[in-house]
Amino acid sequence: MNIPKEIRSIIEKLEKSGFEAYVVGGPVRDFLLEKMPKDWDVTTNAKPEEIQKVFPESFYNNKFGTVTVINKDAKDESLKNVEITTYRIDVGYSDKRHPDAIKFTPSLEEDLARRDFTVNAMALRIKNQESRIKNYEIIDLFGGREDLKSKIIRAVGDPGARFNEDALRMLRAIRFSSQLGFEIEKNTFKAIQKNNSLLKFISQERIRDEFEKIILSDRAYEGIEFLRVSGLLSFIVPELEKGIGVSQNRHHIYTIYEHLILSLKHCPSKKLEVRLAALFHDIAKPQTKAGIGPDSTFYNHDLVGAKFARKILTRLKFSNKTIEKVSLLVKNHMFYYNVDEVSEAGVRRLIRRTGKENLKDLMDLRIADRLGSGVPKAKPYKLRHLEYLIEKVSKDPVSAKMLKVNGQDIMKILNTKPGPKIGAILKVLLSEVIEEPDKNTKEYLEKRVEELSKLSEEEIKKSEKIIKEKKEEEDLKDKKKFWVK
Ligand code: ATP
Ligand code: MG
């Protein structure tokens, strides 16, 4: 791997202007691991104004003291914006999260010493711009290369002191360990266990960013386990700990907590929402458990779980889009799909409930759920059969938009203005058509509109409810037979 020409050029320009300049931190670590860095950070003894003079088209973010150089023509996203920071030290951490001030320093050593872990505290100097072979030198003051080789995350300096300065570093240790597949050095880990409660000083947004990276990493399962053993989990998702040691019933070999982290481990999707749903789908089982031993039940854990997931993700300041999606997946994770018993109308009901765009993710969640139960096979033929049915009914009407009469038509027929009654009628029509798609004709629906219009709004709503509840009860019966929970 080579240092990209955009980066070499930035460093060369700074050096030609009489400054020192290094690649620093994450990209040095990734470069030595022969991984493509996400971004290339540069550090220098030049002050922000001096950097800006060298790069007239850069912009300066005063708050972070960072100058960003724009490479419009760079092919790689990671090279389009390159951040250059002046060597700095952090002064005072009275709130355990932000330095009271940052101070520029002429010393690279001091800048490296403020960094969190040895593998993140190296700098790379380009020795000879002309040479094409090993033309760089690594400044490694804390044994970062050795730790990279032995796959170890180790705090720079005294871990307890460093975590007291900024408690987020404890979570970052676990994040890097799950992303890189590294062990956390013994004293560093002990210091996390000792100081875990300091995490309560850290904002939910910063916690979320690290938590998200753990969830998306290849070792998310190990990451959550590290969070538990270190004691940090209580300060992030204490709800998960409620399932520790809580057994299920004759259909499950794992405790609730074990099942949830194994579902995350086996989640076939790389999407954040699906992974979060895998981790949270049974989050309400401890609270909905009734009975003991092999005959325990967990009725409504899907609905209650969706509420819990919403609460957790709201607290962690995830986006509304993520919150909605995860709670939808959790709410519907019990969907039924036994080959002989699921009807086309049942599949249409499923599509109506969840939306077609979510079905793939829901199936991925089911695969995660099954694999996380220790069930030997994820029964792929069943899912394939369901996919086939979805395809087959995909032209059938599953939403009000697809009905042969719309709100306008209804208003015309009844000669009325918009109002809740129109919506109620549409829902009844849709419920009927979902059961029997052949009824989706103008003629039939117009007749039904006339009939329904004679009822009050209450009565219309009731008749829709009756159809829906009867059918959903059928779904539920199937569910109990097959996926007893
Ligand atoms: P990623 O590839 O995820 O961006 P990174 O190592 O670049 O990994 P960043 O969060 O972007 O991580 O931080 C850049 C560098 O700044 C780190 O490598 C580390 O040297 C330093 N750093 C970041 N956050 C802290 C912190 N809280 N305490 C000390 N040093 C930190
Ligand atoms: Mg970075």
Image: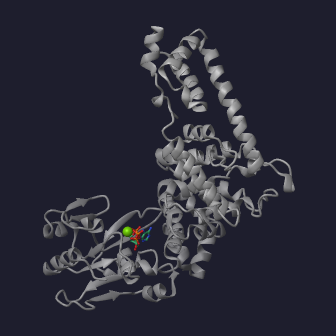
Colour convention: one colour
Q: Name the residue at 15% across, 77% down.
A: 13
Counting from the top left corner in percent of width and height, residue 461 is at: 62, 20
Q: Considering depth in this image, is 263 or 72 the residue closer to the camera? A: 263
In the drawing, does residue 163 fall left or right of residue 475? left
Q: In the rendered view, tell whether residue 325 sits above or below residue 102.
A: above
Q: In the rendered view, tell whether residue 283 sits above or below residue 122.
A: above
Q: In the rendered view, tell whether residue 154 sits above or below residue 94.
A: below
Number of numbered tags placed on the structure image: 0
Q: Considering depth in this image, is 343 or 137 the residue closer to the camera? A: 343
Q: Name the residue at 60% across, 57% down.
A: 278
Image quadrant of residue 466? Answer: top right
Counting from the top left corner in percent of width and height, residue 370 is at: 67, 60
Q: In the rendered view, tell whether residue 82 sits above or below residue 357.
A: below
Quarter of the rendering occupied by the N terminus: bottom left
In the drawing, does residue 292 fall left or right of residue 308? right
Displayed-image quarter of ligand 1: bottom left
In the drawing, does residue 396 fall left or right of residue 3? right
Counting from the top left corner in percent of width and height, residue 427 is at: 55, 25
Counting from the top left corner in percent of width and height, residue 80 is at: 25, 65
From this viewpoint, is residue 323 visible? no
Q: Name the residue at 55% across, 19% down.
A: 425
Image quadrant of residue 51? Answer: bottom left
In the drawing, does residue 312 fall left or right of residue 172? right
From this viewpoint, is residue 405 visible? yes
